Amino acid sequence: MRKALLAALLIGVAAVAVVAVAQKAPAQPQSEEKKQQQRRFEPRVTPEMIRHSRINEALYFVANAWSAAALLLVLATRLSARLRTLATRAVKWKWLVPAAYVALLTIVIAALEFPLDFYGGFVVPHQFDLTVQSFASWIGDFGKGLGVNVVVSAIVVSLLYMAIRRVRRWWIAAWLGSLPLIIFGIVITPLVIDPLFNKFEPLHDPVLRRDLLDEAARAGIERGRVYQVNKSKQTKTMNAYVTGIGPSARIVMWDTLLAKLDHDEVLAVMGHEMGHYVLKHLWQGFALAVVLTFFGFLAAQALFDRGLRRWGRRWEIEEAADPAGLPLLMLISLLISFAISPITSGFSRHVEHQADVFGLELTHLNEPMASAFVKFAEDSKANPRPPRVLEWWHHSHPSLGRRIDFVLGYKPSRR
């Protein structure tokens, strides 16, 4: 147990050290020709931007180490076993014990992680003037998120422990069962969960709506659904995204984006988002999830069984089907997810680049797309050219500086 705790702490310290060293690494020199070409489209990098980026990079690694330490604490103090006992006494039917247990565990973990969530989600955005959200509004959103997490976790964990009780190689059942749950989550999230936090409406601007529908028609998207959402209540930053499948499929633009980008910049950005839709990146992501979860569940059961044999008695975990062992399973999942971050992040950057290419081929708006990226960087106060090692490890998008380089040098082929 001491070795596991020490390992988690060393991972956290080493990760923060990597961030600090990487941030000091010198940027790769650019040719004079590139410097001249990008003079109009180079984001203005300020000390505040660099500091904000460093904090966010550190928070990524610290959050992983913090979560691992919280789970180890719950196990080592036998708090997990006490929560299991409490859940057993609280519910009448045995099959509901995992649901009651995970509801209690979720609240405990949320309390342990709250200081970091508060700092990263409320203090830092206010410190860098990236939000005007009041604490009451922020804590309200936090509470809603916790409530959704409790409900979803109760359902998923109940199904998981049903498999663990009945199937020796439960990882197979868990893997197969996770696939329809992922699809269901993709369908239901835009319709049920997202509206809990924000108001989604059809795009207000009739001229922009007309031009976006024309753009969607050129992209081959029929009956395109384009929404705007009032994210200005939570942030000053900008974003747009594609979500959902079937009846819930839609392209969503934050109202902050509509307020800060001009007409052509919006069309350029939405050409990128339409690329995700047309190129079926969501389904490609699902296919990757199928493969990764197969090996993930296989490794999880092997490590879980081994961990129980070594520490189960010390932690008062009676058997694999004992819900008190869930924090160990969550810890294993966290470590696996962290370890494969370069794979998932690399895939994400690949499809984002494909969407950039699609958007340029569709719109031919190279300079508006580049200027939009400049605004994204300056508006979010994000370093447009972060160290390569950090980008490779966990960034979901190519860096904005490198995207600007590509956009300005790309020549669309379609006319």
Image (cartoon, rainbow, N blue to C red):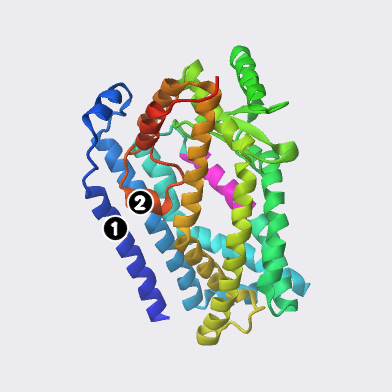
Q: Tell me the number on the disc at residue 97.
A: none
Element marked by disc 2 = helix
Q: Position of residue 321 (x, y in %)?
A: 67, 78
**Which quadrant of the figure contains the N terminus?**
bottom left
Q: Which residue is mark 1?
A: 18
Q: Which residue position holds label 2? A: 390
Q: Amino acid at mark 1?
A: Val
The tag earlier along the polypeptide, 1 or 2, is 1
Q: Is 313 in front, or is 272?
A: 272
Image x and y of residue 273, in percent: 56, 32
Side of 229 where 386 appears, left or right: left
Is 74 on the left-hand or right-hand side of 201?
left
Any part of residue 233 in sight = no
Assess disc 1: are there few (<14), some (14-19) or many (≥20) residues with their C-alpha within 10 Å of its C-alpha. Answer: some
**What residue appears at the point 44 percent right and 23 percent down from the top-left corner?**
366
Q: Residue at x 47, y 31 (%)?
A: 238
**Residue drawn at (30%, 37%), measured in percent from left and top?**
49
> Magenta stretch containing residue 253, yes or no?
no
Mark 1 and mark 2: Cα distance apart in space? 9 Å
Magenta: predominant secondary structure element?
helix
Horizontal arrangement in the rendering, residue 211 relative to residue 64 (left or right): right
Residue 121 in picture, x, y percent from top left: 44, 45
- Three-letter amino acid code at the position of disc 2: Leu
Is any atom of residue 118 visible in this view?
yes
Q: Nearer the viewer, residue 391 or 220?
A: 220
Q: Bounds of the magenta span?
A: 135-149
View extreme (right): residue: 93
**Are the two marked residues, 1 and 2, in contact with CB atoms closer than 8 angstroms?**
yes
